[in-house]
Image (spheres, rainbow, N blue to C red):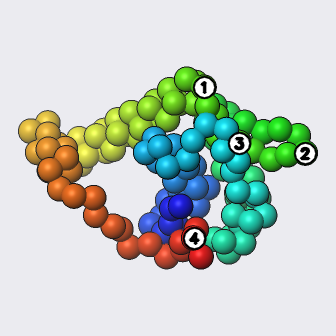
Amino acid sequence: MFQLDLKSGVPICDQIVNGFIKLKALGLISGGEQMPSVRSLALKFSINPNTVQKAYAVLEAQGIIYSVKGRGSFVSDDDRGHSAVIARAKEDFCTAVERARDLGLSAFELKEIVDGVYKTPKSGHKEEKNADG
C-alpha cells in the first residue's frame, strides 16, 4: 500500500490521493479492483473517515476510481483513469518546477536534479503511518 507522513505539511487527503495515483501508475492496483472501504482505510491510518471520503471524491472526480452504489469504490480500468494519473503527475511536476524556479534554481540545476532522480534507486521517505498496519 502506501504510507502517510503526518509531519510533512501535506494534507492527509492529498497524501491519500497521491498514494492511490502512484499505486495505479505503477500498476500495483489494476482496473476493476475494489478499493478499501472508507472505514477500513480510516482505521488502518487512524484518521477521520471524512478525510478518506474526501480523498475518494477527488479520485472519482479525476476518473481514477468509480463508485457503485451499495458495493463500494473500484479502480477505473479505462483510458480516462490512466490519462488522469499521467495528467496529475505532470501537474505535480510542473508545480514543483515552478516552486523551485521561484526559489532561484536554474533550469540547469533542475535538469541535474531530474537526471539524479532517474539515476538513483528509489529511496524511502520518513513516514509515520503505514496503510499495511
The numbered dot on residue 78 is 1
- Going by the numbered disc 1, the residue's amino acid type is Asp
- Going by the numbered disc 4, the residue's amino acid type is Asp
Residue 18 in view? no
The numbered dot on residue 119 is none
Can you identify the residue that label 4 sits on?
132
Q: Earlier in the sequence, mark 2 or mark 4?
A: 2
Q: Position of residue 115 (x, y in %)?
A: 14, 44
Q: Position of residue 126 (x, y in %)?
A: 38, 73
What is the distance, in whole Å, between disc 1 and disc 3 at their CAs?
A: 12 Å
Quadrant of the frame with the C terminus: bottom right
Can you identify the residue that label 3 sits on?
74
Q: Residue at x 55, y 23 (%)?
A: 79
- Going by the numbered disc 3, the residue's amino acid type is Phe
Q: Secondary structure at mark 2?
A: loop
Q: Earlier in the sequence, mark 4 or mark 1?
A: 1
What is the distance, in whole Å, between disc 4 and disc 1 at their CAs?
A: 27 Å
Q: Earlier in the sequence, mark 2 or mark 1?
A: 2
**Dot 3: within a 10 Å radius of its alpha carbon, few (fewer than 14), some, or many (20 or more) residues?**
many
What is the distance, in whole Å, between disc 2 and disc 1 at their CAs?
A: 22 Å
Q: Residue at x 47, y 43 (%)?
A: 27
**Residue 3 horizontal side relative to residue 60, left or right:** left
- Going by the numbered disc 2, the residue's amino acid type is Gly
Q: Residue at x 49, y 35 (%)?
A: 85
**Dot 2: within a 10 Å radius of its alpha carbon, few (fewer than 14), some, or many (20 or more) residues?**
few
The numbered dot on residue 70 is 2
Q: Secondary structure at mark 3?
A: strand
Q: Earlier in the sequence, mark 3 or mark 4?
A: 3
Q: What is the residue that sits farthest to the top in this orientation?
A: 79
**Residue 62 horizontal side relative to residue 10, left or right:** right
Q: Residue at x 69, y 64 (%)?
A: 41
Task: Check if mark 3's residue and mark 4's residue have beta carbons within 8 Å.
Answer: no
